[in-house]
Amino acid sequence: MARAVLVTGAASGIGAATARRLAAAGVSLTLATRGNAEGLEAVAAACRSAGAEVATAFADLAGPGSGEALVGATLAAFGRLDAVVANAGFADRTPWDALDEAAMAASAEAMAMGFFRLVRAALPHLGPGGRVVAVSSFVAHVFRRHVQAFPASAAAKASIEAMVRSLAHELGPRGVTVNAVAPGFIRKDPGRHSQMTPERLAAVEAEIPLGRIGEPADVAGAIAFLLSEEASYITGQVIHVSGGLVI
């Protein structure tokens, strides 16, 4: 059955891996990014090669009207919207003693409010079999000495998880499932800047029971499952893809 899926943050990392995982004949993808045009076009080309119909869109979910713009682009391209993957976001490592109101607000606007804007715009168009998958993070769950904290990001991601649960409760009678995936430490795309030194990377891997950093494809697999018919009786859940970092 044909379906149309909107994926935000699709130009790199988890979003790009998810788009590639979903791409197939009969699948229509709207791939969105804030500004990485080169990365988005590369992902779109790969998805078209796999048989998917692809539209691309640009929006900053921290801004009013962004959700409506992305949903509108999907409807204009495909005439329908069946699933949303809310992946756009960023990590703010600023500790509490250096965190100011502007930084806290920036995380809330881009991630928590961005998710709110996107889902509010999508709601009228999601019917039975509809899917919403949000990408959360381990940072909303792991607080211990040897794992760096992300206070602003943690607050924003925890807010998203609360919205996922309330949405699942409200949309269940409509046959729409709403879930979140919470990645652990995930490897950056080749060529993208990483703030981890080799020593820091080794220390992080020592905290992970499976002993390795995750790959974007690891998370994409979980997202694809939650979008599938096989996951039709799963809703309101946070699925951790962290190699055991969160147990």
Image (cartoon, rainbow, N blue to C red):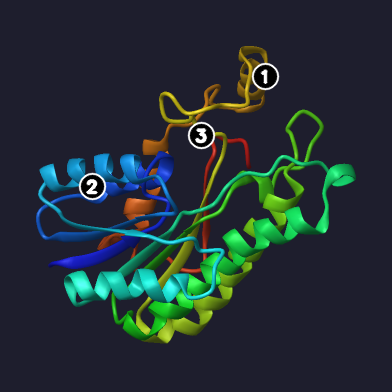
Quick one: label 1 or label 2, which is nearer the N terminus?
A: 2
Amino acid beneath label 2 = Ala
Helix, strand or loop status at disc 1:
helix
Amino acid at dot 3:
Ile
Q: Which residue in the structure is indicated by mark 3? A: 186
Residues at marks 3 and 1, CA–CA distance in whole angstroms: 14 Å
The x, y position of residue 197, in whole percent, is: 63, 17
Residue sitting at the far top: 199
Mark yes or no: residue 82 visible.
Answer: no
Identify the residue at image location x=47%, y=63%: 179
- Residue 204 lies in what quarter of the image? top right
Badge 2: residue crowd in 10 Å (few <14, some 14–19, many ≥20): many
Of the two numbered discs 2 and 3 in the rendering, the one whose residue sits closer to the viewer: 2
The answer to which quarter of the image holds residue 71 is: bottom left
Q: Are marks 1 and 2 in contact (CB under 8 Å)?
A: no
Q: Are marks 2 and 3 in contact (CB under 8 Å)?
A: no
Name the residue carrying label 2. 44
Q: In front here: 241 or 112?
A: 112
Whole-percent x, y for residue 207 in the image: 66, 26
Residue 111 appears at what percent x and percent y? 58, 60
* Horizontal relation, residue 183 to residue 92: left or right: left
Q: What type is the residue that disc 1 sits on?
A: Arg
Residue pointed to by mark 1:
200
Q: Residue at coordinates 41% horizontally, 24% vertically from top-left?
A: 190
The residue tagged with tag 3: helix, strand or loop? loop
What residue is drawn where x is 51% and y is 73%?
A: 117
Query: Between marks 1 and 2, how big is the CA–CA gap?
Result: 34 Å
